[in-house]
Amino acid sequence: MNECKDSPFSLYGETLASRFVLGTALYPSPQSMKDSIAASGTAMVTLSLRRQNPQQQDGDTFWQYIRESGCRLLPNTAGCKTPKEAINLAEMSRELFETEWLKLEVIGDDYNLQPCPFGLVEAAAELVKRGFKVLPYTTDDLVLAQKLLDVGCEVLMPWGAPIGTGQGLLNRYNLRTLRERLPDVPLIVDAGLGAPSQAAEAMEMGFDGILLNTAVAKASDPVLMARAFAGAIDSGRMAFLAGLIQKSQTASPSTPTLGQPFWHQS
Amino acid sequence: MLTLSLNNESRELPDNTSLQEAIEHWGMVEDKLAAAVNGEFVPRSHYSNFKLSDGDLVDLVKPVGGG
């Protein structure tokens, strides 16, 4: 963003060149993922670990492209339902990806993939003690957010909507409350966004960044959609910095009324 | 003979096999992977000394796309 002076996007003391964090799943091909990462301008990508048998070598291209992107890695604990599962997967990720950064997911419900608040706090507390830099995927609940900060998380990632739904910002009141009550905490809206306009709205509200995957990867043209989201996130950020006007119930003319022709005092 | 699970598939190995030997036996020694046995992370530096037991559940995971 060159048009205005912005504060750096800093997480755990490190500055990222983009406020757009992109997921690496669900693309039609590894090449599409690679091109989408480039088009997005992202500086950090999420990824995961899964079982693969010796015969399967299709992950090698994926890993090659990820390394070539030069992006910071943010491994996740997707699919974990207990603190124990999440902690063990986190340890495996730290060793394999050589990073202490972690997108912590502890899922409490299969239907909407809602984070389990109790398991999330328990796992975050242990992982912080073990030296991880935890970025928890959380709901938009203020008290849960405060508990996560209490155990040492320095960044929070509240959901916009359940993962993969594309429904946008379902609870604006809660999201605004988080932003207003935690003004100095980096907040990244993570999951549920479907359209660039929704990402722009979150940025206009003052959120610090956006993490998404499905909306880009499942678009008809993922590369073009990555570019669209990048533009929307930049626009939303600029709008936040510029300061939105107050909404008003009554109209107010933008064109000067002084000197209006055809007007005569009766 | 040990009967154990590799990524949820049944496998057999000689008695007293280490995790390192198992990974070599399965042809995965060149792979970028991380390991857990019975749900507990096993650091790479422990592979050689980690003796597998009958009924162990071995997970070997590799990088994949994630959101």
Image: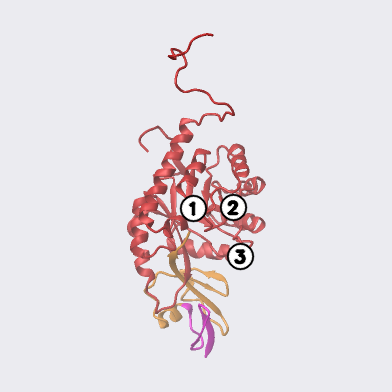
The residue that mark 1 highlights is A194
Residue assigned mark 2: A138
Amino acid at circle 1: Gly
Element type where label 1 sits in the image: loop
Chain letter, disc 1 residue: A
> How crowded is the residue under tag 3: few (<14 C-alpha within 10 Å), some, or many (20+)?
some
Q: Do the dots labelled 2 and 1 sit on one chain?
A: yes
| Residue for point 39% across, 69% down | A59
Q: Which residue corresponds to the image point at 47% horizontal and 45% vertical from the top-left?
A: A197
On what subunit does the disc labeled 2 rest? A
Colour scheme employed for the rendering of this structure: by chain
Question: What tint does the image give chain B?
Answer: orange
Tell me the CA gap for discs 2 and 3: 18 Å
The residue to which callout 3 is attached is A84
Task: Answer above or below: position of B36 versus A154.
Answer: below
Which chain does the residue under circle 3 lie in? A
Residue at 52% over, 63% down: A91
Q: Colour of chain A?
A: red
